[in-house]
Image (cartoon, helix red, strand yellow):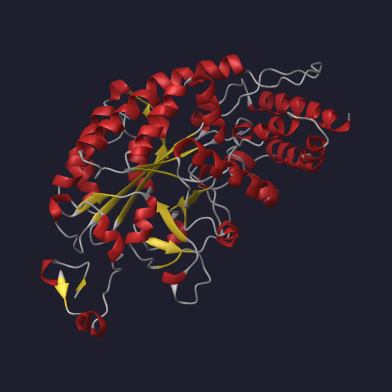
């Protein structure tokens, strides 16, 4: 006998039925399927939608105002960094993590989530809000939370140095293992930056089985982001690709992350019941609803008085109840284990989840950003040589400068995206951000020479 992922009439079929009439949609992996505590002990059918919640947690080490006359090696404004970390912990991290722990408990582990947490955020939590790490550890111990791999310093190192990129992946995997006793098997690059080259490099490392990326309309063409895909080069056999791809459903993700409190949005206010119906409409046009967003969406970007926590609190039961027995929540690795890919997703140029363009223009869109990045990575070899020669702190100082936020602050885009860039920047203008960064970089250079 074999279990098929079809309607009720096909739950149990002889193997010969499967061989003679291969399924028209991917089977769930039987071994993984049998280990999942399915709602009402029912088997999933062909109209199931699995919700995959992924949250990004990141805090950069912002620079203090560093003039051309400064010569000390103390670059980071840690008074401001501590203040911001504690503020966001109070508005987002603590209440949201406690809410998630309660939801996991109430739903007996059937509600599942995933996080990627940068090394710079973990360092700040350890310094100033260690209870946030403890809450994350409790989620990890619940068995309903997966921690993903990424660059340790939230960098764009892949664009400039594959060696540094790989070193940061190793560092981050070690941090996740040390804090949460998990070995990441799913990768997300900084700001969901992705291309075929990223897939090839990650596949060659042999450390991960899937990558999270943006579902870009013009690359998908007529296809849906609600399936698993693979990079090009599978020669018609996507099931055996080294790397699988989970694509963000940006419309439904952004309904929560950006539009939830927008009173000019026709769907405002958004009740969980309506959102659950939208998720359920995926049935028949895919089997995944990948909701990827910044964790700060909960309480910081969408304040508590918008109702975001109440929305989140009842969302699982509304998704279960809108189509009883047919919808569930999975972590990214469970998605990969449960569902087969349906085809190739060809991304010849770098994409991201930022701004309306979904490209690199938020970080590499003007001459200042390009020059700053070029000068930064030009110092990689001298910095590592000086570090090997005995400068204990230089390499970590330089790596904190690789954090992509520093380039983001130099962005000169306005119109649709300008308000977002202004909101996140501690500077009066992109030009101030560039000057300040280059002053620090000049001091880094002098330390390699001296």
Quarter of the rendering containing residue 229: bottom left
The image position of residue 280, as x and y in percent, is 21, 51
Q: Nearer the viewer, residue 143 or 188?
A: 143
The image position of residue 199, as x and y in percent, is 55, 59
Q: Nearer the viewer, residue 388 or 363?
A: 388
Left or right for 203, reference 48:
right
Left or right for 31, reference 166:
left
Query: Is residue 336 at all visible to an observer of this figure?
Result: yes
Give the quadrant of the N terminus: bottom left
Left or right for 405, reference 103:
right
Quarter of the rendering containing residue 338: bottom left
Q: Nearer the viewer, residue 259 or 120?
A: 120
Residue at the spot 14% in from the left edge and 54% down from the top edge: 41
Query: Is residue 269 at all visible to an observer of this figure?
Result: no
The image position of residue 153, as x and y in percent, is 60, 37
Give the quadrant of the C terminus: top right
Residue at the outermost left position = 9
The image position of residue 11, as x and y in percent, is 15, 69
Q: Nearer the viewer, residue 242 or 437?
A: 242
Q: Is residue 279 above or below residue 386?
A: below
Left or right for 366, reference 113:
right
């Amino acid at each position: 006998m074999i279990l098929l992922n079809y309607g009720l009439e096909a739950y149990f079929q002889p193997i010969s039925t499967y061989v003679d009439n291969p399924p028209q949609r991917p089977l769930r992996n039987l071994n993984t399927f049998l280990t999942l505590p399915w709602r009402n002990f029912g088997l999933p059918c062909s109209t199931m939608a699995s919700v995959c919640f992924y949250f990004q947690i990141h805090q950069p080490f912002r620079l203090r105002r560093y003039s051309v006359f400064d010569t000390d090696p103390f670059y980071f404004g840690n008074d401001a960094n501590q203040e911001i970390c504690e503020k966001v912990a109070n508005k987002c991290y603590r209440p949201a993590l406690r809410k998630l722990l309660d939801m996991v408990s109430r739903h007996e582990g059937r509600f599942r989530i995933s996080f990627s947490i940068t090394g710079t955020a973990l360092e700040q939590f350890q310094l100033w809000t260690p209870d946030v790490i403890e809450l994350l550890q409790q989620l990890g111990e619940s068995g309903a939370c997966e921690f993903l791999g990424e660059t340790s310093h939230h960098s764009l190192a892949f664009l400039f140095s594959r060696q540094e990129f790989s070193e940061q992946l190793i560092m981050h995997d070690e941090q996740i293992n040390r804090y949460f006793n998990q070995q990441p098997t799913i990768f997300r690059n900084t700001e969901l930056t992705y291309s075929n080259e990223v897939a090839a490099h990650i596949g060659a490392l042999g450390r991960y089985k899937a990558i999270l990326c943006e579902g870009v309309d013009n690359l998908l063409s007529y296809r849906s982001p609600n399936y698993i895909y693979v990079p090009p080069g599978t020669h018609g056999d996507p099931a055996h690709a080294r790397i699988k791809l989970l694509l963000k459903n940006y419309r439904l993700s952004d309904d929560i992350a950006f539009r939830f409190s927008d009173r000019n949005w026709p769907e405002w206010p958004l009740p969980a019941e309506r959102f659950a119906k939208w998720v359920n409409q995926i049935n028949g046009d895919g089997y995944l609803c990948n909701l990827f967003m910044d964790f700060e969406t909960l309480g910081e970007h969408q304040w508590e008085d918008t109702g975001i926590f109440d929305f989140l609190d009842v969302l699982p039961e509304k998704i279960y109840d809108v189509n009883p027995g047919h919808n569930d929540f999975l972590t990214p690795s469970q998605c990969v284990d449960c569902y087969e890919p349906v085809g190739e997703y060809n991304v010849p140029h770098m994409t991201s989840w930022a701004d309306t363009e979904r490209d690199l223009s938020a970080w590499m869109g003007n001459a200042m950003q390009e020059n700053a990045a070029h000068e930064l990575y030009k110092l990689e070899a001298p910095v590592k040589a000086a570090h090997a020669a005995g400068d204990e702190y230089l390499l970590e100082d330089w790596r904190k400068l690789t954090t992509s936020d520093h380039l983001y602050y130099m962005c000169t885009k306005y119109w649709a995206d300008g308000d977002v860039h202004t909101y996140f920047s501690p500077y009066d203008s992109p030009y101030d951000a560039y000057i300040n960064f280059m002053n620090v970089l000049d001091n880094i250079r002098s330390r390699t020479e001296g």
